[in-house]
Image (tube, rainbow, N blue to C red):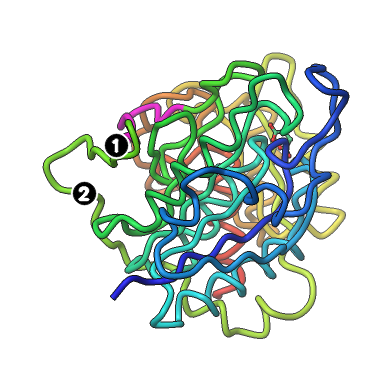
Amino acid sequence: MNKKTVILGTGGTIAGTGAAGSHTYTAAQLATEDLVRGIPGLAQAAGADLVIEEVARIDSKDMNHAVWRRLAQRCMVHLADPRVGGIVITHGTDTIEETAWLLHELLPADKPVVLTCAMRPATALVPDGPQNLLDAVRLASHPQARGVLVCALGSIHGARDVSKVHPQRLNAFASLDGGPLGWVEGGQVRWAHAAPPSAATARQGALLQAPVFTDGAWPRVEIVMSHAGCDGALVDWMVAGGVRGIVVGATGNATLHHELEAALRRAAQAGVAVRIASRCPLGRTAAITGELWRDADGLSPVKARISLMLELMAA
Ligand code: SIN
């Protein structure tokens, strides 16, 4: 049976408008319905039925926990519907990798949840949004697609590896270590490896029903960077302010400026959870053992922040 595809809108440049053909625009202006309307072939690609719902209309630089909570909950409702085959989320490029990782940690992976975006507004001379959206819908209705994926400029990225690597180019995303999982070319999905992505169990799926997730403020987790001239003042200040977790963008192979390290020891001894990620975009640091903190399991600082926040909620 042909299944429904759900499109959930959140805003971003894909819904941005400005003077026709201008580089200046405001993100998140168009209703999700307006993005979808008029894209040739989209209704057919979506299968039996297309459901369109607007979860938010924001510039993704302003993404917040309330929108994340609502988005995860709406995904969950639709994924639980046996008539739904897959979900597409329209999103800004700036934090799409964070939203993808959050959803990867929370949602069951037996159906595809495909995030897409655009680097040019809908009013650009040649906008990239319509093609990205069409490709994302094709991917979301592909029988072998599973789990949380990001689809932009014809490439399919996994939630763990994807990051925005360029502030201006249309081809702004890369899966740095692993490479893309596949491509959408000429309307067809082509997987990079013999086997398409397998369904992984969401590590924090149980949280979706937990009051700590559904009500109130999520634990405060901040990111600090180790850098030349660094001291620990920021960490001491955050601890005094009640931070629950700190993720460090460490130098190289998880090394820390000695003054920052001393402050992190004070923080960890005061009960703050500390995770060490690397500033390096490629590779992963050696595992950290026998310390007051753990390594970030190869995640970038922004993704490690999300995992630590969910870990603290689950605890
Ligand atoms: C945003 O992230 O919402 C604005 C920038 C973009 O989508 O490219």
For image coordinates 64% across by 56% down, the residue present is 269
Whole-percent x, y for residue 293 in the image: 51, 49
Tally the numbered discs: 2
Left or right of 104 on screen, residue 273:
right
Left or right of 51 on screen, residue 32:
right
Residue 151 drawn above or below residue 67: above
Instruction: Return the residue at label 2.
Output: 196
Camera-side residue of 290 and 313: 313
Q: Say whether residue 179 is magenta.
A: yes
Whole-percent x, y for residue 109 in the image: 36, 65
Whole-percent x, y for residue 245 in the image: 66, 55
Mark 2, ligand 1, within 8 Å: the answer is no
Instruction: Return the residue at label 1.
Output: 182
The answer to whether mark 2 and mark 1 are in CB contact below 8 A is yes
| Residue span colored magenta | 174-184
Residue 304 drawn above or below residue 164: below
Residue type, label 1: Gly
For image coordinates 60% across by 43% down, the residue present is 96
Residue type, label 2: Pro
Structural distance between the alpha carbons of marks 2 and 1: 8 Å
Task: Indicate the secondary structure of the residue bearing disc 1.
Answer: strand
Q: Quadrant of the N terminus?
A: bottom left
